[in-house]
Amino acid sequence: MPLVAHTDLPTFTRLAEEGETVLSGNTALQQEIRELHIGLLNMMPDAAIAATERQFFRLVGQSNQIAQFYMHPFTLDALPRGAEGRAHVERYYESFEQIKREGLDALIITGANVTQPDLSMEPFWEPLIEVIDWAAENVTSTLCSCLATHAVMQFRHGQRRQPLGFKRWGVYDHRVLDRSHPLVAGVNTRFDVPHSRFNEINRAQFEAEGLKVLVESDQAGPHLAVSEDGFRIVFFQGHPEYDIISLLKEYKREVKRFAAGALDTYPPVPENYFSPRSQAILEEHRERVEAALARRAPVPDLPEALITSHLDNTWHDSAEAVINNWVGMVYQLTHIDRRRPFKDNVDPSDPLRSLRGGH
């Protein structure tokens, strides 16, 4: 159902131009459709802040539920931002104090760039803990993406992420481990998810804390897990929100960093993402870049136009299905005591008890 453009955030206009259903605030008020208010704690850096809005807004807006979605983006003051990023936040974002006053039905927390060897040394550490502690008492469900998952596992469960020694980067095949959980109802038993990280929380770490891993990859490890009660916190370790070009854009940035001397070695291509033809083009581009650097000549641009038409998105439908289930569960549970596990909020006579965790 539709997103509601209740502010002048440019993301709403961009999504409408892409064909997404976006209602004006006045139109939404004239319809007798239930509202869901979903927060987006956007911790991404300035260069990715708007793209991250679009990715998560799009996933929520495409979920097939009978509700109007009011998205409430906010961020943490402790995160470093340039002039453009600060201006975007000041104009379009809500404050955490406003979020607390008005309340949310659900919360999404994005990843973030890190600069310290221990997450507890990051400037966002204490403010992030405050948000998650508030959400645990006031929000039906919190969905943590990538870095947010690692942070929650460290401060709430004492499980520190493990360095991989390399970058887990690409699109990986996953399988559903527990087909009975409502979050994966109707989802393909095997599906792809993009990953982009240097660290991981492994399955043993989740299970040691009584958390349940629902979706896992033999190569990339756990992707989707849930808190002890089954729904209060949902953990993503991959990036199902990514656009089809997200990994290409990230690869392009890494190549630029190498050309600028910020990386010692040329970046590898993301795994299972580029076609053989595209990989050949990128290998030729690598040779041109290295030759230009050797001659101290200008570095050629990456030939994106030759690559984009050969990219495949093999993860969005499954990502949309999981988010659809998540939103559906939030929709059903927002009127129930949020302090109780969702599986204990089951009325045996309720025809939707399977969605609520009953049998």
Image (cartoon, grey):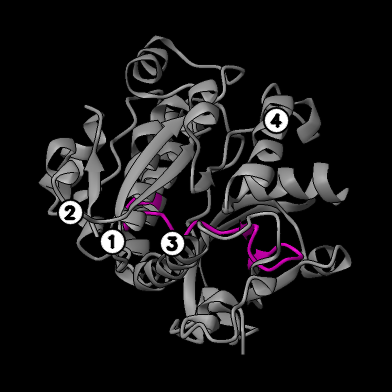
Q: What residue type is labelled 3?
A: Tyr
Residue name at image x 24 percent, y 43 percent: 4
Q: Which amino acid does label 1 sit on?
A: Gln
State the extent of the magenta-drawn residues as a range: 223-246
Picture mark count = 4
For label 2, count other residues whose C-alpha is less than 10 Å away and answer few (under 14), some (14-19) or many (20+). Answer: some
Q: Where is residue 172 in the image (x, y as percent from the top left)?
A: 53, 71
Q: Quadrant of residue 299?
A: top left
Lower sequence index among marks 3 and 2: 2
Separation of marks 3 and 2 at Cα, in angstroms = 21 Å
Q: Which amino acid does label 2 sit on?
A: Glu
Separation of marks 1 and 3 at Cα, in angstroms = 15 Å
The stretch drawn in magenta includes residue 12: no
Residue 251 relative to residue 300: left or right: right
**Residues under numbered marks 3 and 2 in contact, where contact means CB atoms less than 8 Å apart:** no
- Mark 2 lies on a secondary structure that is loop
Query: In the picture, which quadrant includes the N terminus?
Result: bottom left
- Mark 4 lies on a secondary structure that is helix
Residue name at image x 41 percent, y 73 percent: 318
Separation of marks 2 and 4 at Cα, in angstroms = 34 Å
Q: Mark 1 points at which residue?
A: 62
The residue sitting at the top extreme is 83
Lower sequence index among marks 2 and 4: 2
Separation of marks 2 and 1 at Cα, in angstroms = 8 Å
In this orientation, does residue 15 appear?
yes
